[in-house]
Structures are given as C-alpha cells and as structure tokens.
Amino acid sequence: MRAVILKRLALSVPLVFAVTAITFIFISLTPGDAADAIYGSGNPAAKEAMRQELGLNRPLPVQYGRWAWRALHGNFGKGINDQSPVLHFLKLRVWQSVSLIVGALIVSVAVGITLGVCSAVRGGLIGRVIDVVALLGVALPSFIIGVVLIVLFASIIPLFPATGYVPFTQSPWQWFRSLVLPVVALSLPGIATIARVTRESMLDVLGREHIRTLRLNGFPERTIILKYALKNAALPVVTVIGLSFVGLLSGTVLIEGVFALGGLGSLVRSSATDSELSIMLALVTFFTLVVVFMNLLLDIAYAWLNPRIRLS
Amino acid sequence: MRSTQPVAKTAPFRGGAVIVGTLLLTALLSPSVGAATRKSTKKKTARTTKAVTTTAPATTAPPATVAATVAATTIAAAVNVADPRFIQGAKTGDTLTLGMLTQPNNLSPVLNGNGQLTIFNQPAYAALILRDSNGKALPDLAVKWGYSADKKSYDITLRADAKFSDGTPVDAEAVKGSIELYKKSGAFASTAAAITGVTVNSPTSLSLAMSTPDPTLPYLLSQDGVVGNVYSKKALADPTLMTSGSYGAGPYVLDSGATIAGNTYTYVANKNYWNQSSIHYKKLVIKVIVNSSAVLEALKTNQVDAVFGGDPQTASAADGQPGIDLTFAPTSYDGLWLFDRGGEVCPALKDQKVRQALNTAVDRIGLAKGLYGKYAEPTAVPSSGPGQEGYDPAFETVYPYDPQKAKKMLADAGYPNGFDLPITYVGQPARTRLVQAIGAELELIGVRLKASPAATFPAFVADLQGKKFCGMQLPSSISLNPYTAIGGNFIPGAPLNPFNSSDADLLKLYNSYPTTDDQPAVAKAMTKRLLDLGWNVPVVRTSSIGFVGTNVKGFKITTAEGVVNPTLLYPS
C-alpha cells in the first residue's frame, strides 16, 4: 500500500511540470499579452516598458524556467493587473471553491449512490426516472441549470439568495443558504452519472450467486444490499466519482460565473482572458495537486474495497 | 475616452474598455462650464459651513466655443464652494450594493480608469472636476479652473480643506505628481499630450503649461477623463499600490479585507473626506455578476440595489417588471470600421466609391429594429449623435439603403464581383449577431465579410496591430467632444487608426478646431468629411442600460454622461 502511495506521489512531480509547461505553451500561443490587456492599443512606450519588466519578450523556455525556479521556492510571483502576490488571490478565494466543490462532491456521491441503489433494488419507475434525470444532467449545461434554479428558487419562490457567497465565519446559516443553489447546479451532472453507474453495478452484483446464497441463508435484505452488494458494486462507482470530481473542478468555472461567486473557478476564467500567466500557473499547479491528491484517496479506496489490489 | 458599453460588458473582455477608451477620448466641452457651476454653487451653498463667495466668470462667451472654455472659467474664489455630491435632505443609508456586469483589470485609476470601469474608482478617488449626470463640469478638488489670458497655461485653484483617506492634505504637489504619473504610465496618456508641464504656484494653486489650448480639459480633468484624478504621496511613490488599494480623496475608501477582486469590491465611508455630509452610505459594495439573467434576479431579490450595464435582451425582460426602473440613453454607435483606407491589404477599400457603396448596402432600419428593439436606432453618422456637437440630423440621409445602387457603385469602381473583407472583433454573442447581420447585407452586393472573432481582448488588440484585417466591428462613444473623438480615432497615429490613414481636409479641420471662433461649425464639417470619406460603416446607435431598484435615487444615464457615478447615488 505504501508503495502505491509513494509511486503516486513520485509521479505527481513530473505531472505538475508537464501540466504547467503545457499551460505555459498554450497561453503563449494565444495572440496578445498582458501588456495588451492593460494598455489596449494606447501608450506603446509604457507597454514596451512593461514587457521588458515582466520579461515577456524573452524566449519561452527562459520564461518558463524562471517561473518554475521561483515556484519551487514557493514564490508564485504577483499579479500583473492587480499587483498583489498570487497566493493572496488564491487565499482570498479558496474557501469559496472548497465549500462549493466539497459540497457538490458530498451531494453528488450521497444522492447519486442512494438513487442508484434504490433504482437497482426497486427498479421500474425509479429506474426510468433516474435515466431521465441522468440524461438531463449530462445534456443540460450546468450554467443553464443554474439560471433555472435562480429563477425558480430565488425569484419565484424566494428560498435562497440568487447570487453571492457569505463566509462561514460571518454566518453559518447564511453560508449554507448561499451554497445551496450553486451546489445543486454543480452536482447535478455528477449525481446523474454516479446514480447510473451505481445502478448498473448493483444490478450486476445482485444477480450474482453469492448474493443468492446470502439470501438463502436468511440474511436480512438490508444487510445484503448495504453490506455485501454495495461494497462489491463500489469499484466502478469509485472510478466514476474520481471522474466526476474532475468535472466538478471545471464546472466551477461556469457555476461561479452564474452565481457571482468569487472562487478559484472565476479566477481561472479572468486570468486566462487577461493573460495573467502567474495566476494561471498557480491555479493549474493547485488544481493538479488537488487531482493528484483525490486520485490518491481513490487508490486507497480501491485497495480497501479490493483485497487483490491491497495484497499485490 | 468614454469606453463604450458593449466592449466591456462581460468580464472576459473587460479590457475592452481600455481600447475603446484609447480611441474614444471623450471630451466634454460642457456648454458653458462657468454657468453650470455657478448654478450649482448657488443651489447648494446651504450645506457649507462658511459663507460662500463666488466670483462672476470673466466672460460670458457663447456656449461651446473656445472662448467659453478658454476664457477663465472662474467659478468661485473661496474654497468653500458647493460640493456637487451634497444632496439637500438626503438620508444616510447603510449599504448601497451596485451590480456590474464587468470588472476592472485592477483598481488603479491610472491603468484602468476609463468608461464604465471608472465606476470602481469613483468612490475612492476624487478628481479636480466632477461631471454630473448631465455632463456638467462642477468643482470637486478644484474650485476654479480656466485658461490664462494668453491661453498658454491652464490655472487651477484647489480646495484648501480636502484630505486623502490617509489624512494627508490634497495639495498642488499631489496634483502635479498625479498628472505627471498619468502622462508617464496612464493607459490613455496620449489624451494628456497637450499638457507639457505642471507648475506649483502655492499649496492650493498650480498651472498647466499647454502646447495647444485643448478645449477638452474640463472633461480630461474630471473623473471621466481620469487625468484629473489625484493620488496621495504614498501612491505616487509606489503607483503599484493602487492596483489593489485606494489612495484617493473620494468620499469612500476601499475595504481591502472585504474585497475579492473580480467579485466583490467593498468601500466604506472615508473619515477624512472633506465634507462628511455628502457621504450617502456607510458602505458601498460593487458586486460583479457576469451573467445578465442572474444580475436581474439579484436586483429583484434586493441583493443589489441597482445595476449598471445590460443588453437589450435583459432590458426587454426587465421592462415593466414591478420594482425595476429601466434607464437607458444612446451612448455609442456601432458597425464596421474600415481601417485599410489606403488599400494595403484590401485594395478595394482604397476607393472612396467602394467605401460609400458599403455604406449604401446596409439596411440600418431593419438591423436596428431586428437586433436591438427600442434600445438602438439606425444611424449612418460616425463619431457623433443627437444633441452632441458635430451632429446634424441631415447626415442620417446621406446613405439611403439601396443595394442595387451599391452594387452598381461597386461595378463602377471595378469590383462587379465584390471582394473579400476580412475583419476582426471581440467574439461576444451580441457582437457576433451584429457582424453576421451586416455580413448578410454585404453578401447581397457580393462583398464577402470574413469576420474572425478574437477570443480575448489581448488577442483583439494583437489583431488590430497586426494589420492582417482591413477593418473591425467595435462600438464607439458618441458622448465625445469631436476634437477628442477624431484625435483618438481618425488622425495619423491615433490608436484606432492602425493603417495610419490620413485625409488632408479632415486634418486641416481638426487642427483648426481648438482656436476657431465657431467650433460647432468646424465640428459639423469634420463629421461631414468623415461621412463622405466612408471610413466607417456605422449601422446603429446603441444605448447604455441601467436597472434601478426602489431603494436608490440619483441613478441616471444620459448621452452626455453614460457612466453612473456611485458617489452621487443616495437612498430614496
């Protein structure tokens, strides 16, 4: 097990470099730079001075090397437009994103698995409903779901605020209320996918012989489903949770826009369109590390669920 | 330099304000600055603590002539002249929350302050002059301003009691430093080119040395023109501080702890503001909501008190809804810009006949109605609009819609089969709709509009400078003084003139404007010349739109002042 974890962690180092380097190349391929973003087509002298200062005229590998060297020393640089340290931007925004992503992860896992199990056990109508919801969840972009939720549950039935975020420290209740709609909008595609995979996997497991044996031995149905069947059915579900999690990270970019949340997702969008290279690279590093960490957790979950992995 | 609304409408392209601004230097040659200010002084003296002494203007020249601007616009000799932010009988509210569909790149007024983005700077920074919602120039940090008799210097007298939010006094040295900083690193530094030097005469008096008597100074020195914003010593020593903090003498000061750039900007009342009775809220919050449906819902549920910015679709959705007051006024003209007037990349555009044919081929009435409803009107006139200097309604009929005639004009010019016209634009949905509609019209006369949407604003700027495209789509302000607008857009070296097109007649008119005795006539002649040259294909005159809830007063959008000043809003 320890070997698995160490191997994963070792792999994450080249991964971070590869991802940031690719980001660097992609951003440099887009026409225009930070000086264009700030000065438009005016003040060419100030623009050139800025390019010199930021090293935007240097060769790409030099620029990347400079960034990587500093990043290794914990210095992610500062913003170009707003010249605060990059980590300051992340610090200000990270809790909004964490609340949103963790909330959506919990909701999509809990609701997805519950729905999946229910439909596998009860079948029939619930199964079909889940199919429809799954289709909608996948087909409808989350920002459209977000707008519909705002109209329904903030405007017509004013249960929740339409936009914005209230910090937990300010008011836990308002914090919760401010998160309900964005979390629902963000978790819907995940719920749909997880529910479908859970159902398929459960149906498969419930049809197996060892379940029949358990039933014949008089085990209560509840125990059979929750203890034996679900654990056996969990492997593909864990895989799909990992995939959904990555979807949640990218989903925040759109959802934060709709609900006017100032998390990392909206920072991704604005830093990309403003050629804010330092912020973009810090975000990419952060998200890469989060994904690596999540995958590690999933690996541990695999090992726990499947003794063959654990023992090998 | 008012940036026009649509450019900066959504966050991804908020830098748009910058570019347009660069080109569209607004001028406000406020019709009779002196008169306007006198009036306000009279009306508002009640709240000042000491008696107000006003001095009659030195001359009462006809409005909007150079004489009016240039003649010493002596407003008031005493420093206790009226505060334009003061509103008799207004209560102080707790929090004003303003919704914006766009966000600034940063909070530095030097780099960023322009067009609607000045809304983020106006709370914390006071300028020398304040333009009110009718575009009138009123005293702010300056109480008196005007040209010297020889018109070579512009003399400014400051309020003696103003302080920055850090408690240090606003003095002539700070103003000098601020103007010099803007000239060096301001995003629109070229607007201040006529100011060649700043001399401090005393702590409350200074003179600007002028290379030409720029008639647009009252605009430039205002919160809209940005050049007149004044920054504290600390900010002048390290201007980057302003990108994330506030260092001005406005009624509010930024609360950095409660601000998340790009999302929520929180300002609190400035304890050192010189007139506490004209601060209308304890707290001012600007929330950036990029989704126009969400912003409307936020307004309906009282999450925001008013919204600046919005598209015709959102406006139509809000129209008639209880509790939402819709306010809009035409502030921009939109359509195509034909850059390559010398025919370097698109030889056809060298021919004036061809450019005129393009102007004749567009069904402006149909496009305005179909795309914008009541939030736009058809127009063929570049650079100016109704009520503005340089405009004449007769100009609208110069290019009546006639595709047959347009086709014939093209054939006469040697292009019976049309030609390819590559253009660039900022790829937002509303713009794409307009570009496609214009493209469909041009298709009928055989001109193939090859429109390439730029994914980001920096990409758009790169497109413009790369000389790959023969034109672009971009809305441009009509609130500008013609001198500023032409200077920013149509003379060689102007930011929006990448191919450096030049026309001797236009240039002659432009150069004569500051010193002529009849500026309105010269302004009209300039517009007419532009119209005949066919350098642009204006199609519609679009509106800036605002939505106001029931809690706020003072929210007004006009053609002369298309940007709402949050410090002038007060509780209803």
Image (tube, coloured by chain):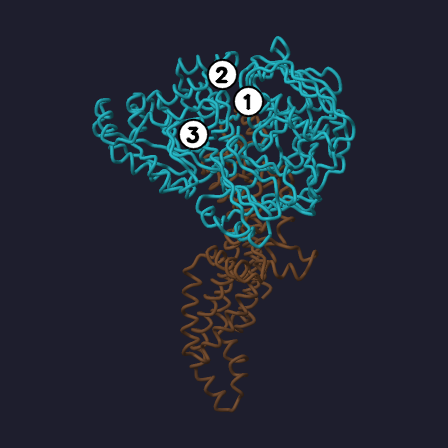
Chain colours: A brown, B cyan
Residues packed near mark 2 inside 10 Å, few (<14), some (14 to 19) or many (20 plus): many
Q: Is residue B454 above or below residue B323?
A: above
Q: Nearer the viewer, mark 3 or mark 2?
A: 2
Secondary structure at badge 1 equals: loop
Label 1: chain?
B
Label 3: chain?
B
Task: Give the x, y percent position of residue B509.
Answer: 44, 14
Indicate which disc, 3 or 2, sits on the residue closer to the N terminus: 3
Asked whether disc 3 touches disc 1, contact meaning CB atoms under 8 Å apart, the reply is no
Residue B519: mark: 2
Compare residues B34 and B420 and report the one nearer the observer: B34
Secondary structure at badge 3 equals: helix
Indicate which disc, 3 or 1, sits on the residue closer to the N terminus: 1
Residue B29: mark: 1
Secondary structure at badge 2 equals: helix
Task: Give the x, y percent position of residue B47.
Answer: 74, 33
Asked whether disc 1 touches disc 2, contact meaning CB atoms under 8 Å apart, the reply is yes
Q: Is residue B287 above or below residue B333?
A: below
Disc 3/disc 1 C-alpha distance (Å): 30 Å
* Mark 3: amino acid: Leu
Q: Disc 3 marks which residue?
A: B464
